[in-house]
Amino acid sequence: MHPAIPILLMGALVALLEEPQPLPETARERVVLLPDADGRTGEVKVTAAGGAVTLAKAYAGADVFASGKVQARDDTLASIQQRFGPALEARPPQPVSFTLYFVFDQDELTPESLAQFDRIKRELAARPAPEIVVIGHTDRVGAVAYNDALALKRAETVRTALVAAGIDAALIEIAGRGEREPAIATGDEVDEPRNRRVEIVVR
Amino acid sequence: MRATVLVWTLAAAGAAPVYAAQPAGVVKIVKGSVAVERAQEKHAAVPGLGVQAGDRVVTGRDGQVGITLRDNTLLSAGPNSTVVLDEFEFDSTTHAGVVDASVRRGTLSVVSGKIARQSPETVRFRTPNAMLGVRGTSFVIEVGAEAP
């Protein structure tokens, strides 16, 4: 046998065994979970035609392919900054919240609350296109509907006070959360002064 | 279901926009060219411009935009991006509501708001190939240029 023939045969055999390699599919879309401002993370479930991936820790990511395939990946802060820097840079400032307390069932502000107004004005001046949301809260004494009305009345009183302090009324929206969001969890009908409050959100 | 189309006007240049009703959100940050498209209208985005359900936000090659929704959701997009706020509803008493937004291309950063805490099942973000369910958190989405 010619010395070259076995080598040629082997080459043919290898060629037969090798599957033609498809071009690697590139991901069309990417989702990456980020830590919240307090360092914790929530969860994002990414679902496509070919599966789903749940992201539950900081910088966990998922690539989504045109075929519908979803593939988990670990991303890094450096890679996030490179790909998403401009989007993250344009993030509006996080809303800030101020809390004012009331004397039970009377629409009287405390002196401490009045002092908060100056801080609120400073926040307004520092933010682009600022808005204020005044949210009234109650404790759990009384019915839900009564507390909704009371909460809204508290918010309305604070709005009037803010406008009197020189803040543009057009920036202010009011809301009443009633007894739905107690600062301190209590049973129903519990008198809890720390839950009788108005929250002022500047965003 | 689409939110009712809100009547709005943009006051003379430099003045704050005036709303006939509450918008879904407000543009806070604009850099470079950014447009808010609504039916047949197209508006250059400026801080203070209201964003409504149904609006399409488009950033140019140098564009960046940041929007705060009424439930405190923070949305911000990088250059060459198209993001549509398909649906938005928010009840400020119960915190019930709907956020439904899609990223058609480009990059979007999201910090979820009060609706995602109260009823995460009604918060949806979409890309051309995927749907995202969100449980109170922040995340980023990128849709490649080759995607439709």
Image (tube, coloured by chain):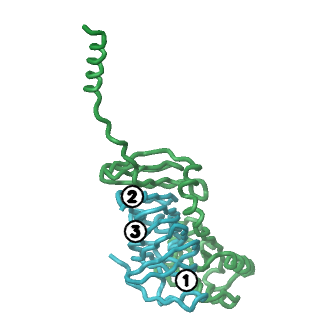
Chain colours: A green, B cyan
Left or right: residue B47 versus residue A164 is: left
Are tags 3 and 2 found on a single chain? Answer: yes
- Tell me the number on the disc at residue B146: 2
Instruction: Give the residue at x 49% y 90%.
Output: B9
Q: Amino acid at mark 2?
A: Glu
* Chain of the residue where label 1 is placed in the rendered structure: A
CA–CA distance between discs 1 and 3? Answer: 24 Å
- Whole-percent x and y of residue A131? 59, 80
Compared with B69, A46 (above or below) is: above
Q: What residue is disc 3 on?
A: B100
Compared with A81, A167 (above or below) is: below
Is residue A197 in sight in this rendering? no
Foreground mark, 3 or 2, reads 2
Left or right: residue A16 versus residue A72 is: left
The image quarter containing residue A107 is: bottom right
Q: In the structure shown, which secondary structural element does the residue marked by tag 3 occupy? A: strand
Are tags 2 and 1 found on a single chain? Answer: no
Left or right: residue B121 versus residue B69 is: left
Instruction: Give the residue at x 58% y 54%.
Output: A81
Instruction: Give the residue at x 43% y 63%.
Output: B105
Q: Amino acid at mark 3?
A: Asp
Foreground mark, 1 or 3, reads 3
User: Alpha-carbon neighbours of circle 3 within 10 Å: few (<14), some, or many (≥20)?
Assistant: some
- Tell me the number on the disc at residue A174: 1
